[in-house]
Image (cartoon, helix red, strand yellow):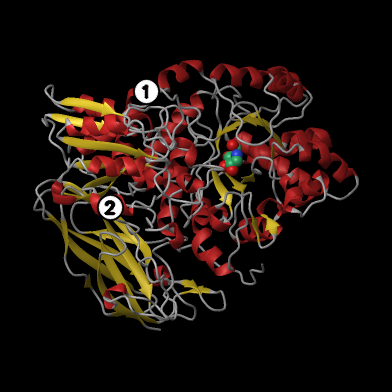
Amino acid sequence: MKFPYKINFYGIFIFTFVVFTLISASPAKQEKPSKKDDSRDKKIEELISKMTIEEKVGQLNFLVAGVVTGPTATPADPAKFTSLIKENKVGGFFNTYGADFTRQLQKVAVENTTHKIPLIFGADIIHGFRTIFPIPLGQAASWDMAEIERAERVATVEATAVGIHWNFAPMIDISRDPRWGRIAEGSGEDPYLGSMIAKARIYGMQGKDLSADNTMAACAKHFIAYGAAESGRDYNVADMSERTLRDIYLPPFIASIEAGVATMMPSFNEIDGMPATGNKFMLDSVLRKELGFEGLLVSDYGAINEMVNHGVAADSKEAAKLAIKAGVDMDMESYAYLTQLPQLIKEGKVNIETLNESVRRVLRLKYDLGLFDDPYKYSNASREKKEILAKDHLEAARTMAKKSIVLLKNENNLLPLSKDVKSIAVIGPLGDNKKELNGTWSFFGNENDPVSIIEGIKQKVSKNTKVLFAKGCEINTASTELFDEAIKTAENSDVVIMAVGEDASMSGEAASRATLDIPGVQLELIKAIHKTGKPIVVLLTSGRPLTINWVDENVPAILETWFLGTQTGNAIADVLFGDYNPSGKLPVTFPRSVGQVPFYYNHKNTGRPYDESKDPNNTWKYASRFIDVSNTPLYPFGYGLSYTTFEYSDIQLDKKQINPSEKIKVSVNVKNTGKVAGEEVVQLYIRDVVGSVTRPVKELKGFRKISLQPGETQAVAFEISANDLAFYNLDMTWGAEPGEFKVFVGTDSQNVKEAGFTLIK
Ligand code: NOJ
């Protein structure tokens, strides 16, 4: 793939909001962390001048020494780790923790190695360390940047206390395919929302000063296009045009660079015939030279050697050469650098300056983290004791969890339930379960920590309320033998809360699914309970959108609850009983059928677009449509209900046309027309009607989360400049093209008010 033009990406996301009246959620306070100082470079150059080739290579060797998250591993033997450190053969370890254990390993490094260079400890802290927050896809549903930043802050405070310096997060892969299990780890399908969240997470982790003992280096991953794995199968090929890559997949990485992210991780997949790990064009020409990323690149787990399987390297030696030349600084768990680089240098196949540059990046990161000043500062047993599961951490987790919940349906205002209801039946395999609630990537959490759904409900209801429970079935087996008991339990209650969905292992890495159904016999269980005629609320636990058409057609109330972590039961009870009015909005499209995926709101129009509303008899042929399923999603991107209702006025524009140096003000009045206070995410989309290349039917360009009392109206305004209208033109230059634009403001990507304006030359 050739990217022939020098393009300026910056400014894509510069978007100004103007708000006339009270706005409750101010954007996250985002400041760049402080960087560099001269003494750093001096010290590092001195060190490099004294190091042998082997000692330098040792700094690039990065090994697992705790929770194993890949197919190979160094034996989990502290004696082995100690001897590797003493032999100057390791730069750091990952997925190990504990103030005492990390201190012990660090001591060996700073007392028993030639140059006394401290180790770096990395880990996957994807949604909380011990206090587990909702999975990232769930957090994204909050559209609340301040709260997401706070969640990362909490995770960072806990992780840094146990000796961790570096987090392999945020995972910022855009994904339009819910079959891909790792959609759970990201922020969904939209590049704008994904970019805002990437920044909030990085600021939460890195803070203003990377050397503080309660901040850590972030790692934006996975570069690039990992979320576009063909058929959603993990590690599969990603193949796409340069335009799609730039429009959809690169923006969160650009945002991460703007936020000062310290490190990045290339992805496992190939792109344009070359695995990302060896892709010099993507890593060097695009990421470093064009986008200006100056930080460290760490390979993914075993990814250097996997280039042999990919078929671009004959052996580990060729793989190491490809990776180091592409600019990968650290080798995670391939041992390819350790075993091959010295020889490659001696044979002149890799330049010593290439090696020095990677070592420099590793040492700079260690320096910036403050490890040369005090290698033990993060391994602090008394902080560990104080911070883990601290009260305010649990409070933050509960707030994040309730804000992540999305109300998908609420017929006749079945919700919120009264706390005085006489009897409630909790039915389903997730109703009295703790173990699954932390979700994927939560191995530092404790599976007994989460408040179960039934515990949360019991704590919330009145003393007189009877709370019954029946499991009904397992999550993913074929047995219906518990159905009868569940039916009886439902019959003895006034209302049924069904806790169904996926287990934690069904999403995350290496957890792709070919179907999006609720697993096992859970749908049959819902149908059986439905026959009792009792009012049903379905709580859906999932790491991805599921296809729930029958549930949507037949069950009056549905809440998408993702995997909510430590505070699951409390957050769900807050929402079920109206102590919190749900405000989540889907960061990803819910399809009706797996056959619709990849499915996303910002699609192109095609030459034969299909409009169902103009085809009541379903006879329209020769249109871009399916003959067996609608073109519409079950729930669109941006969708989510509230216990109150919001009314949008028509859009007001302050001009009918603008020139490229002007801005246009787009405003609406939003009124709370219901009886309770509520939060609303006001969403702004645009469409470029005619371009030199095709443009999406809608593109998110701004949003505000506002809070309204019953009867209250707020004016919400956005400003659009030519930069917000810009895209990669036919010749791949960046800019806005004169012509007609549509602008939409609304409560989700479908339900919008529309207006139009013209950009003149
Ligand atoms: C493989 C995953 O792709 C990556 O995201 C993770 O950071 C590493 N394993 C380390 O666990």
Residue at image position (66%, 44%) is 299
> Residue 336: x percent and y percent?
77, 40
Q: Quadrant of the N terminus?
A: bottom right
Q: Which mark is residue 552?
A: 2
Residue sticking out furthest to the right: 347
Is residue 75 or residue 670 the one in the foreground? 75
Crowdedness of circle 2 by 10 Å Cα count: few (<14), some, many (20+)? some
| Relative side of 104 to 694, left or right | right
Q: Position of residue 19 (x, y in %)?
A: 23, 58
Q: Quadrant of residue 105?
A: top right
**Mark 1 lies on residue:** 390
Residue 100 point in image, percent of width and height: 57, 16
Per the image, label 1 sits on a secondary structure element best described as: loop
Residue 278 seen from this side: yes
Q: Amino acid at mark 1?
A: Ala
Please state the total of marks drawn on the protein image: 2
Residue at (26%, 27%) from the top-left corner?
Answer: 469
